Image (cartoon, helix red, strand yellow):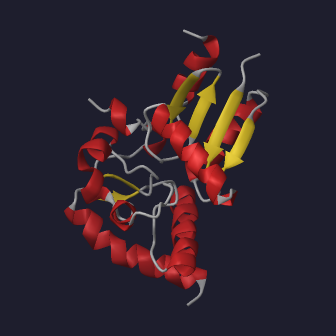
Amino acid sequence: MSVEGRKKALRELFAPTVDRLGYKFTPNDEDADFLLEQLANIEAETGVPYCPCQARSKDRAADMRMVCPCIPFHRKHYDAMRRCWCGLFVHKDVTDPDSLRQIPEGRVK
Amino acid sequence: MKKVTIYALSTCLWCRKTKKYFEEKKIPFEAVDYDKQDEEKQKAMTAEMKAAGFNCSFPFVRIDGECTQGFDPAEFDRMLDGK
């Protein structure tokens, strides 16, 4: 499958899952397109669509916590930011994703 | 001038935005793409990030002795101003 085809497939695969979690795709189409392309490339390389903004390790359990969409594994952290770490998904009520800050997990209150 | 170091992933959107932010402010920085390094260097980078109290999410930014994680221009400015 082409990268463009896989990007479209990933979007269709993720949409209902993140909807049930209270999230949606970022309304910033340029960012969403870039991130989906990274996911498609990472999946082609590793077989798994790992988060493009988190480093993989040799620890399978740890790596499973960064398979997109990784929201359930980081619920408190992402809910505090109202977005996931890579920014592909934002809370459903977010209209201006650029206003959201990335907050290190250890600094979430 | 303060020394700025950015640890990044080549696939990370916010790492790109962080590099662009410092470029546009004309602040020199050293950028290291974690995923382009050998295993030994990756281990050293991971150890440094963990020692600073962070996990392995990117970008990781060190400005002199102070560190942060994520794309946060307000935090970068505060660290550059030393406040």
Apparent side of residue A92 relative to residue B41 in the rendered image (left or right): left
**Residue appearing at x 52%, y 24% in the figure:** B75
Q: Count the marks: how many?
A: 0
Q: List the single residue furthest toward the left.
A: A20
| B7 and A40: which is toward the camera | B7
Residue A37 position by quadrant: bottom right
| B50 and B3: which is toward the camera | B50
**Residue appearing at x 58%, y 25% in the figure:** B76
Res. B34 visible in picture: no
Q: List the single residue furthest toward the bottom.
A: A1
| B9 and A78: which is toward the camera | B9
Q: List the single residue furthest toward the front.
A: B40
Residue B59 percent coordinates (x, y): 56, 43
Res. A37 visible in picture: yes
Residue B56 percent coordinates (x, y): 48, 47
When the figure is inspected, residue A4 is found, relative to residue A99, above or below; the finding is below
- Which quadrant of the figure contains the N terminus of chain A? bottom right
Residue A61 percent coordinates (x, y): 33, 64
**Residue appearing at x 57%, y 58% in the figure:** A30
When the figure is inspected, residue A108 is found, relative to residue B1, above or below; the finding is below
- Which quadrant of the figure contains the C terminus of chain A? top left
Residue B66 percent coordinates (x, y): 56, 22
**Residue appearing at x 65%, y 21% in the figure:** B64
